[in-house]
Image: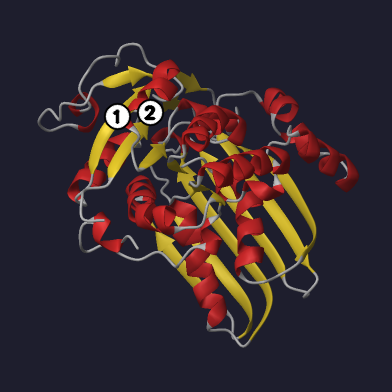
């Protein structure tokens, strides 16, 4: 393809500030944008991303199907919510119209192990129209391919253990609420933690019903297992509230989180495999105090042990750059709902995105 890749932006919140700018700076263009915030309807996307006007107005997301059918972009970037049930309609519209789509939705990273029926439906629809759907972002590299690469330099692995923290203030209200931020400990236990006090059989039934609430690492562990050729025998999840000794202001929640209330949560997912390798990963998402910062640390145990630590990663920018750099891979991929573990290891895009298309 010698022409610019045409991109639709679905969701014009915090993440789109970067994804839209990165799209232009990588030689592609935004041809449509959607949101549910009526205050943005009819405004130029420059209102969100900054800079000069682009001549692209933001539409009501309820009109997305009609607009996309007429414009028919090459790919749609979906930056809205964290669960598949919340991005399902956007994915379905794209699949129905044969438009490739990539989402920052964390569950979309590997939804096969948390909401298989919905994933299968979208996979079959995308295959029928010849497009590709996927999820990517920060986890694609820092919880996925980076760890797989380290594993590739290890003679024997017994365990992979990871921990990653992030400030829920950076990702919008939907993510903050999904982490239980602002809830009392009793409320957190009822709304968040209670979902994981179930047996393996009960969890399987909930997953089949499409009602499971996975932490980010639930899907990451599934992705890693497939990427490394491991066969999962069991997987469990435990969520624990995070608190702070003093009140914390949250601009995202629009409230003061009282001392002792949940500022967010820690979710630990433990996966055992037929090969004997255990994957134990933890994500800590919360409203940060002034002295707290993002940190990503993983250790591959075996011969030898290797630990990689990344302090203060620019998680938002890294997420958005990953999404934009993935665009050629998504367009090049086979049709269906294809996780990035089945795509090439992510490359830096030095040239315009269209030059990487097959």
Where residue 304 appears, as percent x and y from the top left, is 59, 86
Residue at point 54%, 23% (across, down): 258
Residue at point 22%, 64% (across, down): 350
Q: Nearer the viewer, residue 297 or 106?
A: 106
Residue of label 2: 68
Residue at point 22%, 32% (across, down): 49
Q: Is residue 346 above or below residue 95?
A: below
Residue of label 1: 32
Indicate left or right for 21 with 71 as reference: left
Q: In this view, does 22 lie above or below 355?
A: above
Q: Residues within 10 Å of mark 1 (few under 14, many from 20)?
A: many
Looking at this rendering, what residue extends furthest in the top direction?
38
Q: Pointer 2 and pointer 1: residues touching (CB < 8 Å)?
A: yes
Q: Quadrant of residue 332?
A: bottom left
Residue 243 appears in view: no
Residue at point 23%, 27% (across, down): 45
Indicate left or right for 14 with 197 as reference: left
């Amino acid at each position: 393809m010698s022409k610019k890749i045409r991109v639709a932006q679905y969701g014009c919140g915090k993440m789109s500030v970067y994804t839209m700018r990165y799209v232009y700076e990588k030689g592609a263009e935004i041809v449509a944008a959607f949101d549910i915030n009526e205050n943005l309807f009819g405004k130029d996307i420059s209102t969100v991303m900054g800079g000069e006007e682009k001549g692209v107005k933001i539409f009501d997301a309820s009109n997305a199907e009609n607009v996309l059918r007429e414009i028919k972009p090459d790919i749609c970037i979906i930056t809205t919510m964290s669960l598949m049930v919340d991005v399902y309609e956007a994915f379905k519209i794209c699949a129905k119209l044969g438009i490739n789509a990539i989402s920052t939705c964390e569950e979309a990273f590997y939804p096969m192990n948390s909401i298989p029926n919905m994933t299968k439906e979208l996979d079959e629809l995308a295959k029928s129209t010849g497009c590709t759907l996927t999820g990517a972002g920060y986890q694609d590299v820092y919880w996925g391919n980076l760890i797989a690469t380290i594993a590739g330099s290890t003679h024997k692995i017994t365990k992979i253990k990871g921990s990653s923290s992030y400030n829920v203030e950076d990702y919008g209200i939907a993510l903050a609420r999904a982490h239980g931020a602002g809830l009392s400990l009793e409320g957190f236990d009822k709304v968040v933690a209670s979902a994981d006090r179930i047996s393996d059989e009960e969890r399987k039934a909930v997953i089949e019903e499409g009602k499971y609430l996975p932490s980010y690492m639930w899907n990451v562990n599934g992705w890693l297992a497939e990427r490394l050729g491991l066969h999962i025998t069991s997987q469990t999840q435990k969520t624990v509230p995070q608190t702070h000794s003093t009140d914390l202001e949250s601009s995202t929640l629009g409230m003061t989180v009282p001392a002792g209330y949940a500022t967010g949560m820690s979710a630990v997912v433990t996966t055992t495999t037929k090969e004997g390798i255990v994957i134990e990963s933890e994500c800590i998402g919360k409203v940060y105090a002034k002295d707290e910062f993002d940190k990503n640390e993983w250790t591959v145990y075996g011969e030898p042990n290797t630990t990689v630590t990344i302090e203060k990663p620019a998680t938002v920018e890294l997420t958005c750059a990953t999404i934009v750099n993935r665009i050629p891979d998504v367009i090049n991929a086979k049709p269906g709902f294809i996780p990035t573990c089945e795509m090439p290891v992510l490359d830096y895009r030095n040239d315009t995105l269209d030059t990487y298309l097959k």
